[in-house]
Amino acid sequence: MPIGPYFADFACFAERLVIEIDGGQHANDVGYDETRTKFIQAEGYRVLRFWNNDVLSNTDGVLQTISEQIAASPSRGVAAYPSPAGRGREARSAGRVRAV
């Protein structure tokens, strides 16, 4: 889904929510991802990021996280990162979802 010069993996306009599914290459492109996330947030969206392996191996947990974020109605423009394995960006997270 195009949002400005970027493409979101999934976007829900009604919830102003973008979901990004990241492969391992994103561990090396943290700066690009941060710039991209800030732009999408400035457009009024919340951004949730999940690693590919989490989507495939912990689908229920990913869906629960998305559901909780929608139900909690957090402020617009919050980026969250799941942290199940303690690798890459996940290592910077204190819990299952981290808001920046």
Image (cartoon, rainbow, N blue to C red):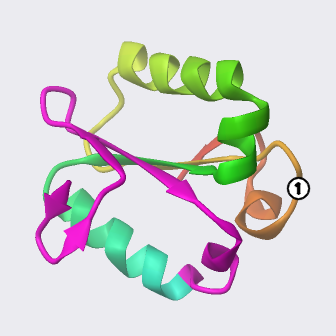
Q: Is residue 91 left or right of residue 98?
A: right
Q: Is residue 26 magenta?
A: yes
Where residue 35 sits: x, y (%)?
37, 80
Residue closest to the eye, 26 or 100: 26
Q: Position of residue 62 (x, y in %)?
A: 62, 29
Tell me: residue 69, above or below residue 9: above
Q: Nearer the viewer, residue 66 or 9?
A: 9
Work out whether 51 lies above or below 4.
above
**Image position of 8 (left or right of 83):** left
The N terminus is located in which quarter? bottom left
The quadrant in which residue 4 appears is bottom left
Label 1 sits on residue: 86
> Which one is in front, 38 or 25?
25
Residue type, mark 1 in image? Gly
Q: Residue at x 67, y 18 (%)?
A: 60
The magenta-colored residue range is 1-30
x and y percentages locating residue 29 in the rendered image: 57, 85
Is residue 25 rendered magenta in the image?
Answer: yes
Q: Residue at x 34, y 74 (%)?
A: 36
**Within 10 Å of the Cα at label 1, are there few (<14), some (14-19), or many (20+) other Cα atoms?**
few
Which is nearer the eye, 85 or 73? Answer: 85
Spot the residue most to the top.
71
Residue, far front: 56
Q: Is any atom of residue 51 visible in this view?
A: yes
The residue drawn where x is 76% and y is 63% is 92
Q: Is residue 96 visible from the viewing direction of this image?
A: no
Place of residue 5 in the rendered image (x, y in percent of width and height, measured from the top left):
15, 77
Q: Determine the secondary structure under disc 1.
A: loop
